[in-house]
Image (spheres, rainbow, N blue to C red):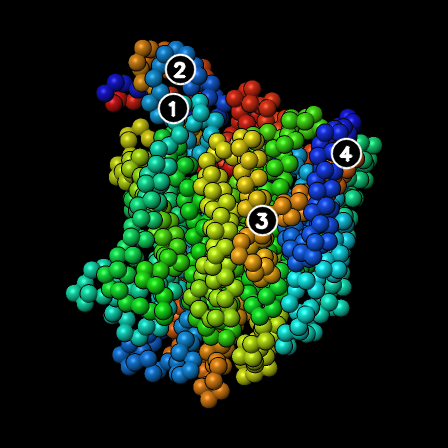
Amino acid sequence: MSGKPNQLQTEILTYAQVQDLVLGAMGRPGRLYWAMVGFCLLGLLYGASCWAYQILTGMGVAGIMHPVMWGIYLVNFVFWVGIAHSGTLISAILYLLRARWRTSIARAAEAMTVFAVMIAGLFPFIHLGRVWIFYWIVPYPNQRDLWPNFQSPLVFDFLAISTYLTVSSMFWYSGMLPDLASVRDRSTGVRKKIYGLLSLGWQGTHQQWNHYGTAYLLFAAFATPLVISVHSVVSWDFALSIVPGWHSTIFAPYFVAGAIHSGLAMVLTLLIPLRRIFRFEALITLHTLESIAKTIVLTGLIVGYSYGVEYFMAWYSGNMFEWDTFIWRAVGNYAPQFWIMVICNVLAPLLYLLRPIRRSLGWLFGIAILVNIGMWYERFVIIVGSMAHEFVPYAWGLYSPSWVELSIMGGSFCMFFFLFLLFSKFLPTVSASEMKEALGPPLRGRLLRGEP
Amino acid sequence: MAERLQGAGIGGWGLRSLLWAGVLAGCLSFGWAILSGDLLRAWQAYLVNLVFWLGVCTGSVTLVAIMNMTNASWGRPLKRLAEAGVAPLPVLWMMLLGLYLGHQEIYPWAREVPHGKGLWLSAGFLFPRDALVLGALVAVAAAMVYNSVKADREAMEGSEQGVQTRWRAQVSLSPVLGILYGIGMTILAWDLVMSLDPHWVSTLFGAYYFMGSLYTGIAWVSLLAALLHGREEFQGRVGASQFHDLGKLILAFCLVTGDFFYSQFLVIWYGNIPEETKYVILRVRTAPWNTLAWSVLVASFGIPFLALLSRKLKKNPRMLGALACLVLLGMWLERVLLVAPSVWSAGELPLGFTELGIGLGFLGLVGLLLLRFLSRVPWLPTGDPLYQKSWQMGIAQEALAGQGLSSQPGGGHG
Amino acid sequence: MSPKVLGVFVYLEDLLGAISLVRDRGGRIHTVYSPIHCEELLKAVGSRPSPVRFATLLGGIAGLLGGVGLAIYTFLQWGFVTSGKPTPPAVPLVVVGFEMTILLGFLSTLVSMWILCRMPRLRLPDHYEPGFSQDRFGLLVSCASMGMEDLTSLLRQAGAEDVRRVSG
């Protein structure tokens, strides 16, 4: 027994109509589309050229300076990994929990995951400076007789992020195979050949569906613990140190909840325009968006709980460094960022408790943007805030990002939207085969499923 | 659905006498320990059991709240069994107040105020706030269960509007209960368990306690389901698929609790800061606690994880019930591991007749209160709209199964 | 290659009916095409549980042993003590083992799925109907004990929208 019967509440009756809707979005793109793609591409190239400038000139062009040796490159790294998590939550975890509202948004959410992980994976390289020696972290026998230190959280990061990138991209791609086949079958000429290659010759035979069904369930079962572990590993980059404000046992679940919080907000940010532009209102219903909003309330409460617990423990522990760090966060040089963080992450999502707000696209979108901003600032406050104000007063110092860092960050956002725009036009954005399954197989004399 | 679904006649004289014998054993052990001057031992065992059973009962009720909030229709027949966790709560609340009588024995802060923590760790502040927080939790839980039982009465009288009103009440109370559970159990964990070693802190401790309590809660519900599923009050609606879902949920909570445990352990191990490691080293490396620690790891996490990977085991009520027993025992030992090393400094493990007696006493008390509740309420939540829907879907499924088709839309690629 | 007959169906129950009819008459079902994953269909055709799970188990175990083994080997070989922790340390290796279990378990599931599904495949069979990925079901039956005409009429009777002869 699974969730409510036919929670889709759509007027779509036939498979052909689902197919038309999904494939209609992949039609010939208009001028506005190309303009947006062009703009994002320009931004991406600008960011890439700034990175090239940094490689040629040196890390001094970034604002990173003692004592804050981890700047917004790492903030962006954690931010993008966080965004990636809710995609896997929606596509894998909600699949295992048989939540019906996930079906229409799973594909787009997974795409968001894949692109976000790709971008996140770039930032350690960018932060590295001497990018050409990145391969030293790969464990292979070498003439230097050196191995990476498997005890280090940075090596955990390497293993976890590369696993996550592999798993999420293959999960996304495998899920698309039946849909790519359906695009192939409705195309002609070169398009047909390309989608034919991409769909790997999928025919939909009963043997294929059998193996595919089992494999997909196993993929979801693997992706679920992976989601929890990846952001726990990222959080341990900080928690395994002894820096005040970082050394805290709650970091793993706190970061995972925060990741899902920011990721769901990004899902809303992407889907609300997408739904409007492609006229997917019948597929991605308001009920789905409401469910996302309600989940954001939950994650916001968990994040708020974590803030509260950290503050209480900082006081209760009697550790003057810990307590001082937390006071400084609220009233020190980075206080504006701190208060933006608290208001945007904890207070703003509470508005979603009100039904009219949940059902208004403008409010949904606006609060989602606020949560994104708040979660970015949370990583800033945690990473930069703690490093700026460690144990010894004469080692305190401030950090502000340089134009190179900000340009690269802007380039990363442009890259994300660029990839997502390409995805939305050239790949099926809604999982048509899963939508068809949710509608139920066509039976003679009965088109709408769910009511006996 | 107007049949008489009262759970009357559950627990004949045999079971009740056993439970009363347990309560008697508890009072005798406790009294004997107090009178023979071993106050530390008595109050320590009292605290372990109080903390364990509070976790089980509140966890069980919070699971219902979670099910209500997520519109879960899978475990609906078991709703009343999980709600039964509210029955021992008022008595446990009183026993929390009773802890005041012995707090001087076990809490170091009662004897000597730790520097800077005097405001928070004083009996005059601690007990009232814990009573308040737990009281609020119990009140909301009771209100939610009251509405749930009343809904069944409304359903029996055929009042559809009454059922809807009661359901809306439960739906609005569920998130309140969830929040109170999270915050309340955190504060209780800090005050009752973490303060036993006032110089040690862990930010995850509260969450670890309430997640572990949800774990014990689901294990407890599974055990009850395994023991009672054959009874006529359930009319055969608790079957293999319910147990399969229960098994999956136990596995999920096992993994989450294990993950929380590891998160604390890894951070403390890695930082190697003496104020933090002292607590862990005492429990994991020093005799006699290290054997207990390994037993807890194996019984609470190792065996359940491996066993619950098997579909056959999950669907079999007897095996799942036995596993649930193991989980409960393992988590009870885990509570001992949290509490005792900070309090007890003699050479061997405090697991003797005193502890056994007091443990049986609490078990008997909880069992009696549970029986009393279950004998006065219907066991199937007929007034629950999601239960009705899941039952109708089940009937429709059976009818169409005869035609070789299913009324259910396919569940994704699975 | 024996001659086959392909029936294209619109409705699921027609297809299921056809499958049981063909079975009763001793025909041999070659392939069933479907646009969706359908449990009843798989059951009707008599699909056994997929052996993909075995690959998963093997991959997972290989990942666990390989990852932890490699890590332990590097600690023993280099023997460098960092921050006073023992070499090799047990506690952090949980993370390493966990990630590698997932990676190799996932990859072996993926590869075994591709192999079992006979993917990638560059050319589709000639009889493949594009509707199979949209909203049509297909039933490919080989004329084992029944004649071509018998099969064709049987499928039409069962409600096939279109019945075609397939050579090879």
In the depicted view, which residue is nearer to us: A62 or B13? B13
Q: Amino acid at mark 3?
A: Leu
The residue under label 1 is: C139
Please rate how many residues cluster around mark 3, counting C-alpha atoms within 10 Å: few if below 14, some from 14 to 19, many from 20: few
The residue under label 2 is: C22
Quadrant containing the N terminus of chain A in the rendered view: top right
Dot 1 and dot 4 within a common chain: no
Give the label, 2 or 4, closer to the camera: 4
Measure how far apart labels 1 and 4 are at the Cα level. Answer: 57 Å
Dot 2 and dot 3 within a common chain: no
Q: Secondary structure at mark 4?
A: loop
At horizontal 44% and vertical 22% (from top left) the residue drawn is: C44
Chain identifier of the residue bearing label 1 in the image: C
In the depicted view, which residue is nearer to us: C148 or B94? B94
Quick check: marks 1 and 2 in contact, CB under 8 Å? yes
Q: Secondary structure at mark 3?
A: loop
The residue under label 4 is: B375
- What x and y, as percent, mark residue B27? 73, 46
In the depicted view, which residue is nearer to us: B50 or A82? B50
Quarter of image, res B104? bottom right
Numbered label attached to residue B351? 3
Measure how far apart labels 2 and 3 are at the Cα level. Answer: 69 Å
Dot 4 and dot 3 within a common chain: yes
Dot 2 and dot 4 within a common chain: no
Chain identifier of the residue bearing label 2 in the image: C
Dot 1 and dot 3 within a common chain: no
Numbered label attached to residue A271? none
At horizontal 42% and vertical 66% (from top left) the residue drawn is: B270
Dot 1 and dot 2 within a common chain: yes
Number of callouts: 4
Whether residue B176 appears in this view of the structure is no
